[in-house]
Image (tube, rainbow, N blue to C red):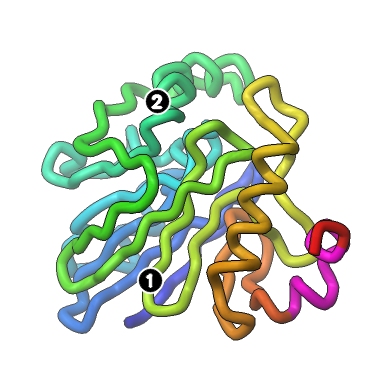
Amino acid sequence: MKIEKIVYPPLYVNTYLIFDDSGNCICIDPGGEFRKIKEIIKDKSLEGILITHAHFDHILGIPFIENIEDISIYLPQEDFFLYKTAREYTKNFLGFDPGEFRMPDRFLRGGEKIKIGEIDINVHFVPGNTPGHLLYEIDKKIFCGDLIFAGSIGRTDFPESSWEKMKKSLLYVLKNFSDDCEIYPGHGPKTTLRNEKAENPFLIEIM
Protein backbone atom coordinates (compact mmCIF):
# COMPACT_ATOMS: atom_id res chain seq x y z
CA MET A 1 0.00 0.00 0.00
CA LYS A 2 1.23 3.46 -0.93
CA ILE A 3 -0.03 6.76 0.50
CA GLU A 4 0.30 10.16 -1.16
CA LYS A 5 -0.70 13.39 0.58
CA ILE A 6 -1.81 16.60 -1.12
CA VAL A 7 -2.25 19.79 0.92
CA TYR A 8 -4.83 22.27 -0.37
CA PRO A 9 -5.07 25.94 0.67
CA PRO A 10 -6.64 28.12 1.91
CA LEU A 11 -7.28 25.95 5.00
CA TYR A 12 -4.45 23.49 4.27
CA VAL A 13 -6.54 20.38 4.18
CA ASN A 14 -4.80 17.04 3.80
CA THR A 15 -6.13 14.98 0.92
CA TYR A 16 -4.93 11.37 0.86
CA LEU A 17 -4.57 9.04 -2.11
CA ILE A 18 -4.17 5.41 -1.05
CA PHE A 19 -2.97 3.00 -3.70
CA ASP A 20 -3.50 -0.76 -3.64
CA ASP A 21 -1.00 -3.26 -5.05
CA SER A 22 -2.48 -2.91 -8.54
CA GLY A 23 -1.81 0.84 -8.48
CA ASN A 24 -5.44 1.90 -8.36
CA CYS A 25 -6.50 4.14 -5.51
CA ILE A 26 -9.09 5.71 -3.24
CA CYS A 27 -9.21 9.35 -2.20
CA ILE A 28 -9.95 10.54 1.33
CA ASP A 29 -11.24 14.11 1.74
CA PRO A 30 -10.66 15.76 -1.68
CA GLY A 31 -9.97 19.32 -0.61
CA GLY A 32 -9.27 21.08 -3.90
CA GLU A 33 -8.88 21.10 -7.68
CA PHE A 34 -8.31 17.87 -9.57
CA ARG A 35 -5.04 18.71 -11.35
CA LYS A 36 -2.77 17.57 -8.53
CA ILE A 37 -4.69 14.34 -8.06
CA LYS A 38 -4.59 13.67 -11.79
CA GLU A 39 -0.81 14.19 -11.89
CA ILE A 40 -0.31 11.63 -9.12
CA ILE A 41 -2.68 8.92 -10.33
CA LYS A 42 -1.59 9.31 -14.00
CA ASP A 43 -3.01 6.33 -15.88
CA LYS A 44 -4.35 4.57 -12.77
CA SER A 45 -7.96 4.43 -11.70
CA LEU A 46 -9.61 6.38 -8.87
CA GLU A 47 -11.99 3.81 -7.41
CA GLY A 48 -13.78 5.71 -4.67
CA ILE A 49 -13.98 8.86 -2.52
CA LEU A 50 -14.28 8.61 1.25
CA ILE A 51 -15.36 11.65 3.27
CA THR A 52 -14.45 11.82 6.97
CA HIS A 53 -16.84 14.73 7.54
CA ALA A 54 -18.67 17.22 5.39
CA HIS A 55 -17.13 20.56 6.33
CA PHE A 56 -16.70 22.35 3.01
CA ASP A 57 -12.88 22.38 3.05
CA HIS A 58 -12.76 18.57 3.09
CA ILE A 59 -15.09 18.11 0.11
CA LEU A 60 -14.32 21.17 -1.99
CA GLY A 61 -12.63 19.14 -4.75
CA ILE A 62 -15.64 16.96 -5.54
CA PRO A 63 -17.15 19.26 -8.22
CA PHE A 64 -13.76 19.39 -9.99
CA ILE A 65 -13.07 15.65 -10.27
CA GLU A 66 -13.25 14.37 -13.82
CA ASN A 67 -15.63 11.49 -14.56
CA ILE A 68 -17.07 11.94 -11.08
CA GLU A 69 -20.21 10.10 -12.14
CA ASP A 70 -18.12 6.91 -12.43
CA ILE A 71 -16.61 7.19 -8.94
CA SER A 72 -18.48 6.13 -5.79
CA ILE A 73 -18.73 8.73 -3.02
CA TYR A 74 -19.04 7.54 0.59
CA LEU A 75 -20.41 10.14 3.02
CA PRO A 76 -21.25 10.16 6.76
CA GLN A 77 -25.02 9.84 7.03
CA GLU A 78 -25.41 12.46 9.75
CA ASP A 79 -23.32 15.03 7.86
CA PHE A 80 -25.57 15.09 4.80
CA PHE A 81 -27.08 18.42 5.90
CA LEU A 82 -23.57 19.95 5.77
CA TYR A 83 -22.87 18.38 2.39
CA LYS A 84 -26.05 19.88 0.95
CA THR A 85 -25.03 23.41 2.03
CA ALA A 86 -21.36 23.19 1.00
CA ARG A 87 -21.83 24.97 -2.33
CA GLU A 88 -23.52 28.00 -0.75
CA TYR A 89 -21.05 28.05 2.14
CA THR A 90 -18.10 28.06 -0.27
CA LYS A 91 -19.62 30.93 -2.25
CA ASN A 92 -20.15 32.94 0.93
CA PHE A 93 -16.85 32.09 2.63
CA LEU A 94 -14.41 31.91 -0.29
CA GLY A 95 -16.23 34.05 -2.82
CA PHE A 96 -16.53 31.61 -5.71
CA ASP A 97 -18.95 28.97 -6.90
CA PRO A 98 -17.30 25.52 -6.94
CA GLY A 99 -20.18 23.97 -8.85
CA GLU A 100 -22.49 21.09 -8.03
CA PHE A 101 -21.70 18.51 -5.35
CA ARG A 102 -23.00 15.24 -6.77
CA MET A 103 -25.22 13.07 -4.60
CA PRO A 104 -23.27 10.48 -2.60
CA ASP A 105 -23.60 6.83 -3.58
CA ARG A 106 -23.54 5.41 -0.07
CA PHE A 107 -24.12 6.78 3.41
CA LEU A 108 -22.03 5.42 6.28
CA ARG A 109 -22.79 5.46 10.01
CA GLY A 110 -19.80 3.62 11.46
CA GLY A 111 -19.30 -0.09 12.04
CA GLU A 112 -19.19 -0.96 8.34
CA LYS A 113 -16.45 -3.03 6.78
CA ILE A 114 -16.09 -2.08 3.13
CA LYS A 115 -13.74 -3.04 0.33
CA ILE A 116 -12.83 -0.73 -2.54
CA GLY A 117 -10.60 -2.36 -5.13
CA GLU A 118 -8.10 -4.32 -3.05
CA ILE A 119 -8.32 -2.00 -0.02
CA ASP A 120 -10.14 -3.18 3.12
CA ILE A 121 -11.57 -0.37 5.24
CA ASN A 122 -13.07 -0.41 8.72
CA VAL A 123 -15.39 2.53 9.39
CA HIS A 124 -15.60 4.03 12.89
CA PHE A 125 -18.11 6.61 14.17
CA VAL A 126 -16.29 9.46 15.96
CA PRO A 127 -18.63 12.47 16.26
CA GLY A 128 -17.69 15.74 17.89
CA ASN A 129 -16.28 18.04 15.24
CA THR A 130 -19.41 17.21 13.23
CA PRO A 131 -22.41 15.02 14.11
CA GLY A 132 -21.52 12.28 11.63
CA HIS A 133 -17.72 12.36 11.69
CA LEU A 134 -16.06 9.09 10.65
CA LEU A 135 -12.61 7.57 10.94
CA TYR A 136 -11.30 5.16 8.31
CA GLU A 137 -8.99 2.39 9.50
CA ILE A 138 -6.78 0.85 6.82
CA ASP A 139 -3.97 -1.57 7.72
CA LYS A 140 -3.24 -0.15 11.22
CA LYS A 141 -3.44 3.38 9.89
CA ILE A 142 -6.27 5.73 10.78
CA PHE A 143 -7.45 8.57 8.58
CA CYS A 144 -9.28 10.66 11.11
CA GLY A 145 -10.17 14.00 9.51
CA ASP A 146 -10.62 16.65 12.20
CA LEU A 147 -10.66 14.34 15.19
CA ILE A 148 -7.00 14.28 16.27
CA PHE A 149 -4.10 16.42 15.06
CA ALA A 150 -0.44 16.29 16.04
CA GLY A 151 -0.59 18.06 19.40
CA SER A 152 -4.24 19.08 19.19
CA ILE A 153 -7.79 18.03 18.28
CA GLY A 154 -10.55 19.25 15.98
CA ARG A 155 -12.67 22.26 16.83
CA THR A 156 -15.84 21.91 18.88
CA ASP A 157 -17.01 25.52 18.74
CA PHE A 158 -19.10 25.20 15.57
CA PRO A 159 -22.90 25.18 15.94
CA GLU A 160 -22.98 21.53 14.86
CA SER A 161 -20.07 20.48 17.12
CA SER A 162 -20.04 18.94 20.59
CA TRP A 163 -17.21 18.74 23.12
CA GLU A 164 -18.95 15.94 25.02
CA LYS A 165 -19.21 13.83 21.86
CA MET A 166 -15.64 14.69 20.93
CA LYS A 167 -14.39 13.52 24.33
CA LYS A 168 -16.22 10.20 23.95
CA SER A 169 -14.73 9.77 20.47
CA LEU A 170 -11.21 10.47 21.72
CA LEU A 171 -11.68 7.93 24.53
CA TYR A 172 -12.94 5.44 21.94
CA VAL A 173 -9.71 5.84 19.95
CA LEU A 174 -7.57 5.50 23.07
CA LYS A 175 -9.37 2.27 23.98
CA ASN A 176 -9.58 0.63 20.56
CA PHE A 177 -6.31 1.40 18.80
CA SER A 178 -2.75 0.37 19.63
CA ASP A 179 -0.02 2.86 20.50
CA ASP A 180 1.87 2.17 17.26
CA CYS A 181 -1.14 3.06 15.13
CA GLU A 182 -0.29 5.77 12.60
CA ILE A 183 -2.61 8.79 12.54
CA TYR A 184 -3.20 10.65 9.27
CA PRO A 185 -5.09 13.81 10.25
CA GLY A 186 -7.11 16.25 8.19
CA HIS A 187 -4.57 19.03 8.79
CA GLY A 188 -0.89 19.01 9.67
CA PRO A 189 1.70 16.20 9.86
CA LYS A 190 1.05 12.54 10.53
CA THR A 191 1.69 11.22 14.01
CA THR A 192 1.20 8.10 16.12
CA LEU A 193 -1.17 7.38 18.95
CA ARG A 194 1.85 6.81 21.21
CA ASN A 195 3.12 10.32 20.51
CA GLU A 196 -0.27 11.86 21.12
CA LYS A 197 -0.79 10.02 24.38
CA ALA A 198 2.53 11.42 25.54
CA GLU A 199 2.33 14.96 24.16
CA ASN A 200 -1.22 15.95 23.19
CA PRO A 201 -2.66 18.00 26.08
CA PHE A 202 -6.26 17.19 25.13
CA LEU A 203 -5.64 13.44 25.30
CA ILE A 204 -3.56 13.70 28.45
CA GLU A 205 -6.40 15.58 30.12
CA ILE A 206 -8.99 12.87 29.49
CA MET A 207 -6.86 9.73 29.95
- Mark 2 falls on what kind of element? helix
Residue 15's place in the image compared with 106, above or below, is: below
> What type is the residue that disc 2 sits on?
Phe
Mark 2 and mark 1 lie on one chain; the one further toward the N terminus is 2
Q: How many marks?
A: 2
Q: Is residue 17 left or right of residue 13?
A: left
Q: Residue at x 81, y 57 (%)?
A: 206
Foreground of the two, 133 or 22: 133
Residue at 77% x, 30% y is 157
Q: Image quadrant for the N terminus?
A: bottom left
- Residue 101 is left or right of residue 124, and the answer is left
Tell me residue 185's x, y (percent): 59, 60
Q: Which residue is mark 1?
A: 138
| Residue hosting label 2 | 80
Percent of width and height locating residue 200: 82, 66
Q: Position of residue 103 (x, y in %)?
A: 25, 27
Q: Residues within 10 Å of mark 2 (few under 14, many from 20)?
A: some
From mark 2 to mark 1, how far is it between C-alphas?
Answer: 24 Å
The span shown in magenta is: 195-204
In this rendering, is residue 122 above or below 29?
below
Category of crowding for the residue at label 1, using alpha-carbon neighbours closer than 10 angstroms: few (below 14), some (14–19), many (at least 20): some
The answer to the question of whether label 2 and label 1 lie on touching residues, with beta carbons closer than 8 A, is no
Taking 120 as reference, is 101 above or below it? above
Q: Is residue 78 left or right of residue 164?
A: left
For image coordinates 75% across by 72% down, the residue present is 196
The answer to whether residue 202 is magenta is yes
Residue drawn at 26 percent across, 59 percent down: 113
Q: Amino acid at mark 1?
A: Ile
Classify residue 43 by image quadrant.
bottom left
Q: Nearer the viewer, residue 10 or 80?
A: 80
